[in-house]
């Protein structure tokens, strides 16, 4: 793996998770036996990444740093350097990624949203690197219904094979009537350092925020962004119902708890 660094934006205030996030950072909400942010770092470590840049808000910085440093490295993360970068004002996902510019420098980097987690057996970063052709690449999935109102949607210039597309645009939450395709951005990306120039120059977009999707749009329009259609779901942990679903899915897959948990669920009336 030639990409050595991942940026994990996790600066959200977790308003959809209130009251749990009144005093606990959203990134430290637990699924089974570890906080969501740890799942994101572990996924990158499985892909051979050795440095994680966590973009957090000021209130959460000390607690998140403490989680990764207290009592030494976490199991499986012994070779991972974890760095904390503070997004001082909440100006959107694109601004959060831009905040990591100095820490990343002139390197290609992965980016993974902290509230979309992969199962412990999977990682999508290798697929992004193999499909990127040394440019940028984003993970895509097919979606319907309210996906058009909840996520960025990719515009497709050409299908290169069954799971690889050349993108020509991207638009944030366009609604079904204005969506350029049914392929949505699922929160895993590979960027070159040129994405920072796009993020620094774009105007606030949807919701008055600096949108990462708008920078992806600029890359796609210049022919510098591919999409990789991934077969497996990421687990959304950004709201109470989806957190419950993710906990159940991971609980059933757990080598330690799965059998007992399945028996418990079967016995519910």
Image (cartoon, rainbow, N blue to C red):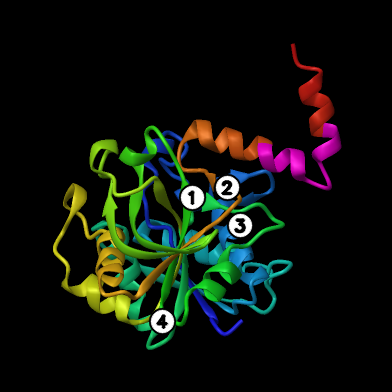
**Foreground pick, 162 / 169:** 162
Q: Secondary structure at mark 4?
A: helix
Number of other residues with Cα within 10 Å of mark 2, as a class: few under 14, some 14 to 19, many 20 or more: few
Residue depicted at x 24% and y 60%: 89
Main secondary structure along the magenta-highlighted residues = helix
Circle on res. 233:
2
Q: Earlier in the sequence, mark 2 or mark 4?
A: 4
CA separation, marks 2 and 4?
A: 28 Å
Above or below for 211 versus 251: below
Q: Which mark is residue 192?
A: none
Q: Which residue is mark 1?
A: 141
- Circle 4 packing at 10 Å, graded few (<14), some (14-19), many (20+), is many
Mark 3, other Cα within 10 Å: few <14 / some 14–19 / many ≥20: many
Real-space CA distance between mark 3 and mark 1, rounded to the nearest whole angstrom: 20 Å
Question: Closer to the camera, 234 or 36?
Answer: 234
Q: Earlier in the sequence, mark 3 or mark 1?
A: 3
CA–CA distance in space, label 2 to label 3: 15 Å
């Amino acid at each position: 793996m030639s990409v050595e660094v991942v940026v994990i934006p996790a600066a959200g205030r977790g308003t959809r998770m209130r009251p749990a996030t009144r005093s606990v950072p959203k990134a430290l909400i637990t699924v089974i036996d570890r906080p969501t942010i740890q799942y994101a770092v572990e996924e990158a470590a499985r892909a051979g990444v050795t440095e994680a840049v966590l973009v957090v808000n000021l209130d959460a910085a000390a607690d998140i740093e403490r989680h990764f440093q207290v009592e030494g490295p976490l199991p499986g993360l012994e070779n991972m350097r974890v760095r904390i970068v503070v997004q001082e004002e909440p100006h959107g996902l694109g601004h959060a990624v831009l905040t990591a510019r100095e820490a990343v420098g002139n390197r290609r980097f992965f980016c993974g949203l902290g509230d979309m987690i992969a199962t412990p057996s999977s990682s999508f970063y290798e697929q992004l690197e193999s499909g990127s052709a040394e440019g940028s690449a984003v993970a895509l999935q097919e979606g319907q219904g309210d996906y058009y109102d909840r996520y960025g949607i990719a515009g497709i210039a050409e299908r290169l094979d069954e799971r690889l597309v050349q993108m020509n645009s991207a638009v944030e939450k366009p609604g079904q009537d204005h969506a350029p395709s049914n392929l949505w951005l699922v929160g895993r990306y590979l960027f070159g350092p040129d994405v920072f120039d796009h993020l620094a120059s774009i105007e606030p977009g949807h919701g008055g925020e600096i949108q990462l999707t708008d920078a992806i749009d600029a890359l796609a329009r210049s022919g510098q962004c591919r999409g990789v259609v991934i077969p497996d779901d990421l687990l959304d942990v950004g709201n109470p119902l989806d957190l419950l679903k993710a906990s159940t899915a991971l609980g059933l897959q757990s080598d330690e708890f799965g059998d007992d948990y399945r028996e418990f669920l079967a016995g519910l009336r």
